[in-house]
Amino acid sequence: MPVIAAYLYSQGRRVREVDIRERVHCPDDRSEFVWIGLSDPCAEEVMTLQRLYNLHPLAAEDALKDGQLPKVDVYGEQVFVIGRTAELKDGCIAYGQTAVFLGHSHIITVRQGSTRSHLPLRQQLEGSPDLLGQGTDYVLHAVLDFIVDGYLPLVSSLEEEVLGMEQRTLDAFLGRSEIARIFTLRRQLTRFGHILLPMEEVTRKLARTDLPCIDAEARHYFGDVFDHVRRVATMTAGLREILSSVFEFSNLMEQQRTGVITRQLAAWAAILAVPTAIAGIYGMNFEQMPELQSPYGYPAVLITIAIACVSLYRRFRKTGWL
């Protein structure tokens, strides 16, 4: 069902369930408000809420479009916020969207493509009526904090994978699949960074700008969310740098191995060149050749070849080529 939960709250306590086709009138002191939660709603349901709560048409249109960048828009006495959710699925980052319509007496959350339900968050807030009773802006803080808290397990899992990959690079050479994984992770972390940057701007604006429906005391809470987003962004940037270092180190190791093999082949080629050259000279079938008629000529040539080869081998061993 698109409507996950819709309740009227008074003094931080649930009063009753409301219908999304019902316009609830609350007092101006913010002691009562309606919290409606939708998940993947149809256009008709959003349009119904638009008429009842005087939502801006552009905001309603953005709430129905998945893939929006995080932002904060002000429409009269209402605030419209879009946050992006992220979670790890099968080793890849999957994104969702949460749009929030904030008024003095209502808060409407619209989730698109996100599997993280707000029901645990709602239960947690209902367990703290003192905080819930302070108004819709504190609920908005809790929703954004819930979204940002979902980033940390994602980054922690990727961090473990990246550090493990870094350790394997020190122990052995990376295979083709691991190199492909490095590029995949770098691409995903880069895209994630493009989400975190506007999320920083959203939380910074909520924490430092005078906005309708946002109490001055609530800004401190949004400042805490801003710190969390910035921490995740720093961790993400660090992971991208580690991946770049792992790839560069792997290349250096591969080049070093290639250089070692090249030197070894060159050294053995130089050693084998000695008997090849001497045997080639004595295989030219000339009558007048040194030591050709001597009974000690053949052993002398073999000894000369052996001495030359051993000398070259020792020289290459000393220089580290063998």
Image (cartoon, rainbow, N blue to C red):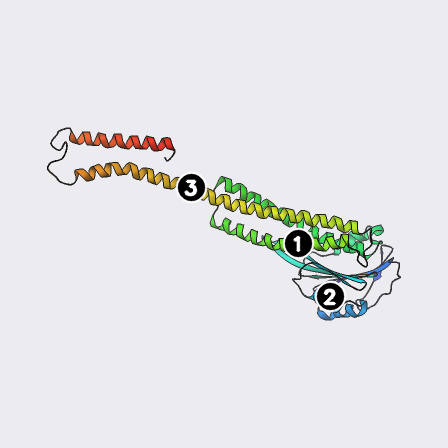
Most extreme residue toward the front, as rendered? 209
186 displayed left or right of 30:
left
Report helix, strand or loop for mark 1.
helix
Q: Is residue 51 above or below residue 206?
A: below
**Type of amino acid at the residue the image marks with label 3:** Arg
Q: Residues within 10 Å of mark 1 (few under 14, many from 20)?
A: some
Looking at this view, is 17 or 191 the one in front? Answer: 191
Q: Residue at label 2?
A: 59
Q: Quadrant of the C terminus?
A: top left
Q: Quadrant of the N terminus?
A: bottom right
Query: Which residue appears at 75% of the width and 56% of the height?
Result: 119
**Type of amino acid at the residue the image marks with label 2:** Ala
Q: In which quarter of the view is residue 257 placed? A: top left
**Residue 197, numbered label:** 1
Query: Percent position (x, y) of residue 276?
Result: 23, 39
Query: Percent position (x, y) of residue 14?
Result: 84, 57
**Type of amino acid at the residue the image marks with label 1:** Leu
Q: Residues within 10 Å of mark 2 (few under 14, many from 20)?
A: many
Query: Which residue appears at 61% of the width and 46% of the height?
Result: 238
Looking at this view, is 72 or 146 the one in front? Answer: 72
**Residue 257, numbered label:** 3
Q: In which quarter of the view is residue 68 placed? A: bottom right
Q: Is residue 173 visible?
A: no
Report helix, strand or loop for mark 3.
helix
Q: Is residue 234 visible?
A: yes
Dot 2 and dot 1 residues touching (CB under 8 Å): no
